[in-house]
Image (tube, rainbow, N blue to C red):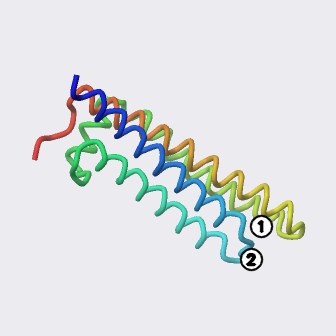
């Protein structure tokens, strides 16, 4: 019974982290950066990775190791990882292209790219949260 309030707090903290990261990425995506789109995408990708690491640490109280990641992916399936990585790279490249194409329409560019960048980060955060929570319940984290 003690676990339920902790689980609610972990979920709340993780969802707040996802929401804050989404807002920051949306603002970064909305800023026009002619010819620097790939650099901006790299920064956003690093932000997404940091968000995922923070969510893991929130649940397990430690940094994600290669062993822990391997066990988690065995539980969720490597197919999810392969498809997820390919999809993530595709989304980020498409967003960079969209931003470059819309560069001539400043306000529309900011609104559309901000929404696109923020929503993809939100979806990534929720998907990662589901994977972490599944591992949390199945006990797939290696004890330190």
Q: Position of residue 124 (x, y in %)?
A: 52, 44
Q: Please give the residue where the numbered disc 1 appears in the rendered image.
A: 100
Q: Position of residue 58 (x, y in %)?
A: 31, 47
- CA distance separating discs 2 and 1: 7 Å
The answer to whether 105 appears left or right of 60 in the picture is right
Q: Nearer the viewer, residue 66 or 123?
A: 123
The answer to whether 132 appears left or right of 120 in the picture is left
Q: Position of residue 71 (x, y in %)?
A: 24, 37
Q: Residue, x 49% and y 39% (percent of image)?
A: 126
Q: Nearer the viewer, residue 48 or 82?
A: 48
Residue 29 sits above or below residue 112 on the image: below
Q: Position of residue 142 (x, y in %)?
A: 15, 40
- Residue 14 figure quarter: top left
Q: Secondary structure at mark 2?
A: loop
Q: Quadrant of the N terminus?
A: top left
Q: Please give the residue where the numbered disc 2 appears in the rendered image.
A: 34
Q: Nearer the viewer, residue 93 or 24?
A: 24
Residue 100 sits above or below residue 142 on the image: below
The answer to whether 137 appears left or right of 33 in the picture is left
Q: Residue, x 53% and y 67% (percent of image)?
A: 42
Furthest toward the left, the residue is: 144
Residue 50 sits above or below residue 19 on the image: below
Earlier in the chain: of badge 2 and badge 1, it is: 2
Q: Residue, x 20% and y 38% (percent of image)?
A: 141
For label 1, the crowd category at 10 Å Cα-Cα, with few meaning under 14, some 14 to 19 and many 20 or more, is some
Residue contact at pointers 2 and 1, CB within 8 angstroms: yes
């Amino acid at each position: 019974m003690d676990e339920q309030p902790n689980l609610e707090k972990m979920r709340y903290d993780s969802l707040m982290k996802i929401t804050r990261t989404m807002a920051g990425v949306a603002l970064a995506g909305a800023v026009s950066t002619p010819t620097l789109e790939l650099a901006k995408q790299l920064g956003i990708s690093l932000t997404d990775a940091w968000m995922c690491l923070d969510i893991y640490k929130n649940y397990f109280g430690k940094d994600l190791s290669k062993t822990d990641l391997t066990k988690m992916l065995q539980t969720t399936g490597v197919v999810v990882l392969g498809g997820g990585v390919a999809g993530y790279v595709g989304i980020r490249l498409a967003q960079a292209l969209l931003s470059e194409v819309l560069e001539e329409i400043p306000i529309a560019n900011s609104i559309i790219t901000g929404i696109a960048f923020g929503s993809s980060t939100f979806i990534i955060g929720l998907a990662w949260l589901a994977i972490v929570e599944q591992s949390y319940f199945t006990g797939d984290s290696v004890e330190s």
